[in-house]
Image (spheres, grey):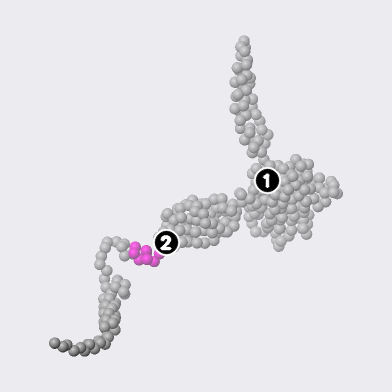
Amino acid sequence: MPLTLTVPPLPLPRGRRSSPFLLVWFLTLLVGAGPLSGVAAARATVGVLAPLEGLGVPAAEAGRVQRWVEAALASVDGFRWLAPGRLGKLLRGSAQLVGCESQPACLGGLARQVGADVVVAGEVGSLGGGFMVYLRLVGSQGRSLRNVSGVLDPSQGGLRDTARGLALRLLDPERYTGTLEVLVDMPHAWIYVDGKRVASSPAPPIPGLAVGPHALRVTHEAYRDFVRFVNVDFGRSAKVTVSLTAYPVRAEQMRLVDGPSRTLGASELPWYRRWWALTALGVVVVAGSATTAALLFKRSAPHDAEVVIRP
């Protein structure tokens, strides 16, 4: 989109010196042009897509995948893509450029010739009913920046999202993310993702998670920890429902103190508090004490010393 700058008219009153008015006009122009620096800093990266090479795939099928990749690359913000025909003409116009798509230095030179900052090249292979796509991103200085691969299968559905995910992994992998929603049945439980505490229940969906498996842990002081691996998909929200399990001791205590206090009946007491258990325990203790005392004091007394007492 072309950038238009509107310059206010120059005020020059008749019959007066124009220097102060020129200064005011120049300052107004600078203030109005202030956002230009931000626009320049946010300039879109210019890219070009080289013709994809077919690995055992007919040219028509490779061209079909080429169009899918072109649309996916165009959906990524921050990039402006040149017509791929410009680069194709260079590749077809010189015998020295045969096989250039596999050489980063050669691709970088082609990018400079067409005025691009980056160039995307790759190969297409057949895989069942779909296509295996290999893409590489090369800078205009001839340095390989990133390589990705993926399967584009029109028979599986979601082709547009799959292709866009492939483009994001290549151009801006930090935006290749998904969302995780954790629904906990108890409030004030801490939610950890990959060992990092991220929220407390009830919590809104957690965005910006890298695509792939993540370790989820939900903790609460009165309940057992909930631990599970969760897989996050690109552009989607994975939902996990957590039902915490209370510790047995705490559950029994809560059950006993629930409602108005009352004296428990004999049948409600645990076995170790019933009369026959306490009686048996007392008998064992008394018998043990008597046996111990008998063993300790069963000793033979020595004979008295015999002496003669004289007057």
In the rendered view, would you say 11 is above or below 292? above
Which residue is most to the top? 15
Q: Nearer the viewer, mark 2 or mark 1?
A: 2
For disc 2, the neighbor class at 10 Å (few under 14, some 14 to 19, many from 20) is some
Q: Quadrant of the C terminus?
A: bottom left
Q: Which residue lies at the image location 62% right of the left edge and 13% below the top edge?
A: 17
Q: Which residue lies at the image location 73% right of the left edge and 48% below the top edge?
A: 143
In the rendered view, would you say 79 is above or below 130? above
Can residue 162 be found in the magenta stretch? no
* Callout 2: SS: strand
Which residue is most to the left? 311
- Give the side of residue 142 with respect to residue 32, left or right: right
Which quadrant of the view contains residue 118? top right
In the rendered image, is residue 164 in sight? no
Q: Is the magenta stretch mostly helix, strand or loop?
A: helix
Label 2 or label 1, whichever comes before in sequence order: 1
Looking at the rendered structure, the kind of residue marked 1 is: Ala
The residue where tag 2 is placed is: 223
The span shown in magenta is 244-254
Which quadrant of the view contains residue 214? bottom right
Q: Which residue lies at the image location 62% right of the left edge and 25% below the top edge?
A: 29
The residue where tag 1 is placed is: 74
In the rendered image, is residue 161 in sight? yes
Measured from the top left, where is residue 204 in percent x and y? Answer: 49, 51
Judge by depth and name the residue closer to the eye, 206 or 271: 271
* Callout 1: SS: helix
Q: Quadrant of the N terminus?
A: top right
Measured from the top left, where is residue 215 in percent x and y? Answer: 54, 59
- Give the side of residue 91 with respect to residue 260, left or right: right
The numbered disc on residue 90 is: none
Looking at the rendered structure, the kind of residue marked 2 is: Tyr
